[in-house]
Image (cartoon, rainbow, N blue to C red):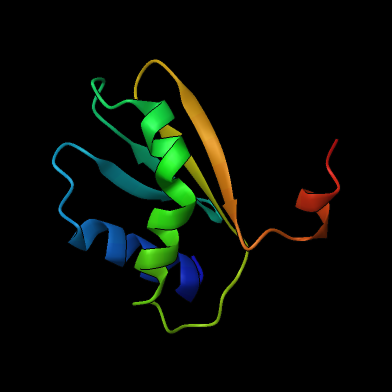
Amino acid sequence: MNAYQQKWIDVLAAANLQGWKIEPIGEDIHVEMPHIVDLKLIRDNLPETLAAISLDISVPKERLKFQFHNGYENFEYVLNPGEADLTKA
C-alpha cells in the first residue's frame, strides 16, 4: 500500500460513514456501501466531494482507483488518471 492510498483510507474512515466498509485492494480502494445507498447520487457528486476531501491530503498525489459497490451495482472512479486511463476506448 502506498502512502497516498493509506492517507485516503484514513480520511474516508475518519468521515465515520455508517455501514461503509473501506479497504485497500491491491493499489485500489474498495468501498462497500449499504444496499440503500443510491450509486447514481454518489457517482454524480464524487468529483466535487473528493476534491473537497483532498484538501486535507498533503502527501504526493498518485493514480488511485476507487471501486464503489452497494450490493447491487458498482462503478469505478480513477483519481489522478495516468496515460493508459485517458486513452482507453
Question: Residue 23: x and y, percent?
Answer: 36, 49
Question: Residue 88: x and y, percent?
Answer: 83, 41
Direction from residue 1 to residue 53 in the image, left or right? left
Quarter residue 14 falls in: bottom left
Direction from residue 17 to residue 50 in the image, left or right? right
Measuring 38% from the left and 55% from the top, which residue is drawn there?
49
Q: Up-down: is 8 above or below 85?
A: below
Question: Residue 34: x and y, percent?
Answer: 23, 27
Query: In the rendered image, which quarter contains the C terminus?
Result: top right
Q: Up-down: is 58 above or below 5?
A: below
Direction from residue 35 to residue 25 in the image, left or right? right
Question: Residue 31: x and y, percent?
Answer: 37, 41
Measuring 56% from the left and 56% from the top, which residue is drawn there?
27
Measuring 39% from the left and 15% from the top, which residue is drawn there?
72
Direction top: furthest residue: 72
Direction from residue 57 to residue 83 in the image, left or right? right
Q: Up-down: is 8 above or below 47?
A: below
Of residue 74 and residue 38, the one placed in the foreground of this image is 38
Total label count? 0
Of residue 62 and residue 87, the one placed in the foreground of this image is 87
Quarter residue 48 falls in: bottom left
Measuring 13% from the left and 41% from the top, which residue is drawn there?
18
